[in-house]
Amino acid sequence: MDFADRVINLEAEGAYHMLSRAQALEAQGHEIIHLEIGQPDFPTFENIRQAGLKAIQDGFTRYTPSAGIPALRAAIAEQAGRQRGISIQPSQVVVGPGAKPALFFPTLALVRPGDEVLYPDPGFPTYEAMIRVAGGTPVPVPLVEEEDFTFDLAAFDRLVNEKTRMVVLNSPSNPTGGVMKRAALEHIAVASRKLGFWILSDEIYTRLAYGDQIPSMASLPGMAERTIICDGFSKTYAMTGWRLGFGIMPESLAERVDLLLTHSVGCTASFTQVAGLEALTGPQDQVKSASAEYRHRRDLIVAGLNEIPGVRCRIPQGAFYVFPNVSALSKTSTWLADYLLDEAGVAVLPGTSFGIRGEGYLRICFANSIENIQIALDRMRKAFTRL
Ligand code: PLP
């Protein structure tokens, strides 16, 4: 088939590939522990489910404005602004089906052929895909393990130039769980103000932070007008399948993104938006208790991994992933991930699913029960000892 250039180099997300391999083994009767897919293991909170159901029963099932129902945009502006210590107008908020549209559409609206876009490697695979679809040139910036996987600022300084149109940041990060410190953000902000490039700040894990509150690029002086915040409900409120997320950006860009939504998805499901409104305005105690539970699991998995010879694991400061260094085992990440699935019944992702600099690492999602994490650790220890 003669496909357009913009789709020729698109690749599947590694997590979906590993999930289907694991499910095929399960269909043959194998018992697999799933630590590959990045989603909360508990159901959407009850009050949110009820709000969605009630909306359907009340007949709230028709089209809405493309950028979202006004009450939801206002609630997002209020909550997201309060959390980041900035003032956000509802007109700056664009609601979409998931957080991914808040990555893809601003990129389509801003990036022109020939523009360069810097993004983290290892990083969420959608970044490279969206840059390529927009016709831009993806420029990976390495992350430094020794500094909790923050951007390699020396490499950043070498790579950034007048062709740089946008820099993608993700803190807390998928796949590393690393968090960018304010000093690193300030360093990048100085370059952005000087060269005029945009920042696309993927903050979807910002409320799953285990230490201090995570600083947002948009809160730095002069940066709100050149920053797009991508955030959503999937991880914070265990709503992955509802498809609800949002972008926050300067109003003129929001208008363009709104048009892209109008002509592609139309709008986000109406009852999903009502559920999202309940998520933001209802009680927040379950967000806090989920975060405390993840922290407990994090401590367990980090300690267990560090006891396995050949494995070295840093403590993630956010999200629900660990990114252990397994280079001492002298096998490729893909080999090790396949081996763990086939020989130990543990599904994890090779670090290379997130870019070439993920070689030597595995990504393990710890949004799973303590019991399953313990079994997985035990199986991994035995499997790696046999190598
Ligand atoms: N950004 C990052 C870093 C993610 O890990 C994910 C999902 O895994 C997304 C964005 C997309 O989120 P959603 O499922 O809400 O579109």
Image (cartoon, helix red, strand yellow):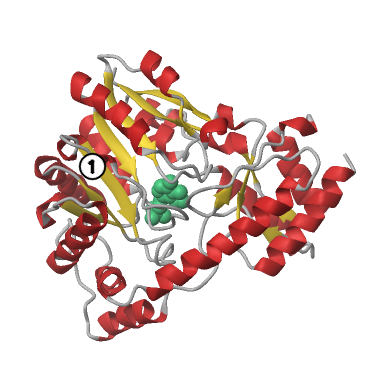
Q: Position of residue 11 (x, y in %)?
A: 51, 36
Q: Position of residue 123 (x, y in %)?
A: 48, 37
Q: Position of residue 262 (x, y in %)?
A: 18, 51
Question: Measured along the vertical axis of the image, is residue 81 above or below residue 148?
Answer: below
Q: Which residue is mark 1?
A: 218
Q: Nearer the viewer, residue 80 or 167?
A: 80
Question: Measured along the vertical axis of the image, is residue 370 above or below residue 140?
Answer: below
The residue at 18%/53% (across/down) is 93
Q: How many marks?
A: 1
Q: Within 8 Å of ligand 1, the CB of disc 1?
A: no
Q: SS class of the residue under badge 1?
A: helix
Q: Nearer the viewer, residue 5 or 373?
A: 373
Q: Nearer the viewer, residue 159 or 256?
A: 159
Amino acid on which the number 1 mark rests in the picture: Ala
The C terminus, quarter of image: top right
Residue 133 in view, yes or no: no
The residue at 24%/57% (across/down) is 80
Label 1 crowd (10 A; few <14 / some 14-19 / many >=20): many
Residue 188 in view, yes or no: yes
- Residue 93 in the figure: left or right of residue 367: left
- Residue 315 in the figure: left or right of residue 281: right
Q: Position of residue 348 (x, y in %)?
A: 66, 49
The residue at 57%/31% (across/down) is 146
- Residue 303 in the figure: left or right of residue 365: right
Dividing the picture into quadrants, the one containing residue 357 is top right
